[in-house]
Amino acid sequence: MSEVQKTLVLIKPDAMQRDLLGEVLGRFERKGLKIVGLKFIHLTDALLEEHYAHLTEKPFFADLKKFMQQTPVAAMVLEGWDCIDEVRKLVGSTNPRAADAGTIRADLSMNMPSNIVHASDSPENAAIEIKRFFQDDEIYSYEKITDRYIFGEGV
Ligand code: UDP
Ligand code: MG
């Protein structure tokens, strides 16, 4: 059943270096996702080891960590109908060269770890990741005049 959800997105250092922050943010905006939290964060070793705990034993983990610390990342909480899966669909699969054309990773990147964006992959992880990066008072609830089209019947 459809529900309004929140998800966590990080815009990674390759997007920051390549001036793609606006492009990526714009794709989420154009879809009709509401940005309810937004800030820059420098990812410490401890934060990255927690966030990528499922990857710490992988041979590429050291490179991934170094990459993720090259610039601050733009962290955001997005809200919308079924947005955890919808955002993963817009982002595309992990390897940009295997991702479907039209997705952010396929359209804007070629390699890992530099695949532009992180997005939560399940309701459980979205809840954990939002708490990892945002305090409750950094997440806003507000109405937009477009809500009737995005959240309602659109009439
Ligand atoms: N990654 C990598 N090499 C790999 C797999 C993953 O460098 O072989 C990096 C890549 O930046 C990826 C991140 O590790 O986005 C997290 O991996 P995960 O499997 O969680 O993929 P995601 O959820 O980001 O699609
Ligand atoms: Mg993941």
Image (cartoon, rainbow, N blue to C red):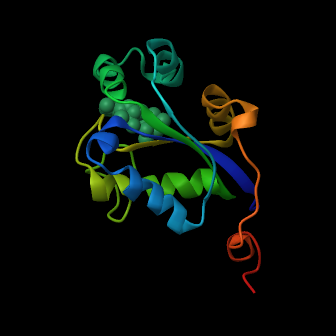
Find residue 116 and report its image quarter.
top left
Nearest the viewer among 45 and 38 is 38
Quadrant in which ligand 1 is drawn = top left
**Residue 152: % across, % down:** 77, 74
Placement of the N terminus among the 4 image quadrants? bottom right
**Residue 41: % across, % down:** 49, 29
Find residue 138 and report its image quarter.
top right
Q: Residue at x 68, y 29 (%)?
A: 131
Whether 21 is drawn above or below 59: the answer is below
| Outermost bottom residue | 155
| Outermost left residue | 110
Placement of the C terminus among the 4 image quadrants? bottom right
Q: Residue at x 75, y 33 (%)?
A: 136
Marker count (numbered): 0
Q: Residue at x 75, y 75 (%)?
A: 148
Nearest the viewer among 2 and 7 is 7
**Residue 112: % across, % down:** 28, 37
Q: Residue at x 34, y 36 (%)?
A: 13
Q: Is residue 115 visible?
A: no
Q: Is residue 116 visible?
A: yes
Horizontal side of residue 6 vs 118, given as left or right: right
Horizontal side of residue 139 vs 11, given as left or right: right
Whether 61 is drawn above or below 133: the answer is above
Horizontal side of residue 54 vs 67, given as left or right: right
Whether 132 is drawn above or below 8: the answer is above
